[in-house]
Image (tube, helix red, strand yellow):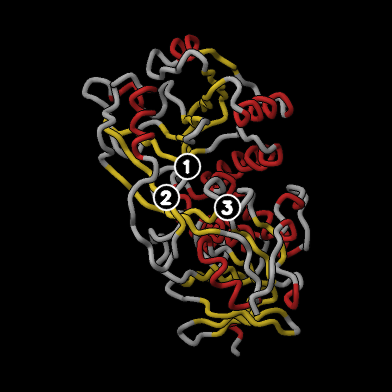
Amino acid sequence: MDQDSQFDVIIIGAGVMGSSTAYQAAKRGLKTLLLEQFDFLHHRGSSHGESRTIRTTYLQPHYYPLVIQSFKLWKEAQAQVGYEVYFKAQHLDMGQFNDPTLRAVIENCHKHNIPHQLLNDQQVAEKFAGKINLPENWVGLTTEHGGILKPTKAVAMFQTLAYKNGAVLKDNTKVTDIKNDNAGVVVLTASGETFRGKKCVVTVGAWANKLLKRISGVEIPIQPIETHVCYWRIKQGHEGKFVIGGDFPTFASFGKVYVYGTPTLEFPGLIKVAVHGGRVCDPDKRPWGSVVMMNELKEWIEGRFGGIVDSSEPVVKQSCMYSMTPDEDFVIDFLGGEFGKNVVLGIGFSGHGFKMAPVIGKILSELVVDGETNEVDLKHFRIGRFQMASKI
């Protein structure tokens, strides 16, 4: 094996998590290889599209420090590359006052001293000039820690910074196996190319179990889910009310349907409003199916926006993948077994990890170099929390 095929770390999967990890590893001086099975910036996974929400309001307390650190790291990265991927906005959470998820979010705001306002339905209408209408028994929780991230642009940013720091990037290179050896790992590809690395990081999203079953016989309970984002037409004369940079927030609505959305940014005259959810699928045999809970979503739009957003049909629908764990917490850990600490996992981001990609990349690179991280207590993300059986 020639010297060009030997690396300190090989990262498999060049979505936002893998690309962020490649940047962090290369910045630390590691000889880094980033592999992607499809074209770079493809639309078959979880890291493409035009917008993602960033927010600090979580019901689980362990995410708050990760998001706060990510705000800082997003700004640092975009300053280095020379263009913006983060656009600031307020954030609004809404739901019935006694909704357990919303109550947990409010409690976390108190626990972490997050500046916030808890508003009744009339106060929400006043704050947002009548653009958002809540039922009488609902409340709104507003914070200044919100905004939009540009996904495809962000992945390109991390890949650019990784390359500028010396990383090698290869797309259309499907990994078929990872073998353990005394000096690290050997990565085998469908084309017959072989690469040797001291360590390996797996960030393959919805393809996690397909790869892990092949290399270790272990199946982690991560379900690939096909989900959709929808864009709705704002009625003529009202378009300016929803534009990013004004007072309209990113938002999430708790209840029987979890609805989320963003101000107008990518498509003039349209607003993104979607359901957090989807259908289980094989990522290699996508159904490209219909939007789940469409009737409930239309009803929500009609009720919350008072008829100034056309709720008859979305004018743009985009499909992407979630990689869902049973508890919707991430998987950040060593694969273990015969691989010990040579293979690091960053998978199962469950439809809410994108905002934390900068700090996840930092954590994964620390696990490669140091075998540990001080960014977060990994007990929430260990694979040991699942009951797993070997499939071999």
Q: Nearer the viewer, residue 308 or 98?
A: 98
The answer to whether residue 343 is left or right of residue 1 is right
Q: What's the CA distance linking mark 2 and mark 1?
A: 8 Å
Q: What residue is at 56 percent from the left and 61 percent from the top?
A: 18
Q: Secondary structure at mark 1?
A: loop
The amino acid marked with disc number 3 is Phe
The answer to whether residue 266 is left or right of residue 159 is left
Residue for badge 2: 227
Q: Nearer the viewer, residue 71 or 208?
A: 208
**In the current view of this chain or complex, which residue is farthest to the left?**
236
Q: x and y percent of residue 316 in the render?
A: 28, 43
In the rendered view, would you say 322 is above or below 189?
above
Q: x and y percent of residue 222 in the render?
A: 58, 59
The answer to whether residue 256 is left or right of residue 242 is right
Q: Nearer the viewer, residue 259 or 240?
A: 259
The amino acid marked with disc number 2 is Thr
Q: Which mark is residue 62?
A: none
Q: What residue is at 47 percent from the left and 82 percent from the top?
A: 190
Query: For the residue carrying disc 3, how many other residues have a C-alpha within 10 Å: few (<14), some (14-19), or many (20+)?
Result: many
The N terminus, quarter of image: bottom right
Residue for badge 3: 349
Query: For the residue carrying disc 1, how many other residues have a C-alpha within 10 Å: few (<14), some (14-19), or many (20+)?
Result: some
In the rendered view, would you say 2 is above or below 256?
below
Q: Quadrant of residue 65?
A: top right
**In the current view of this chain or complex, which residue is farthest to the bottom?**
1
Labels 2 & 1 near each other (Cβ < 8 A) = yes
Residue for badge 1: 276
Q: x and y percent of residue 206 in the render?
A: 51, 61
The amino acid marked with disc number 1 is His
Q: Quadrant of residue 382?
A: bottom right
Q: What's the CA distance linking mark 3 and mark 1?
A: 13 Å
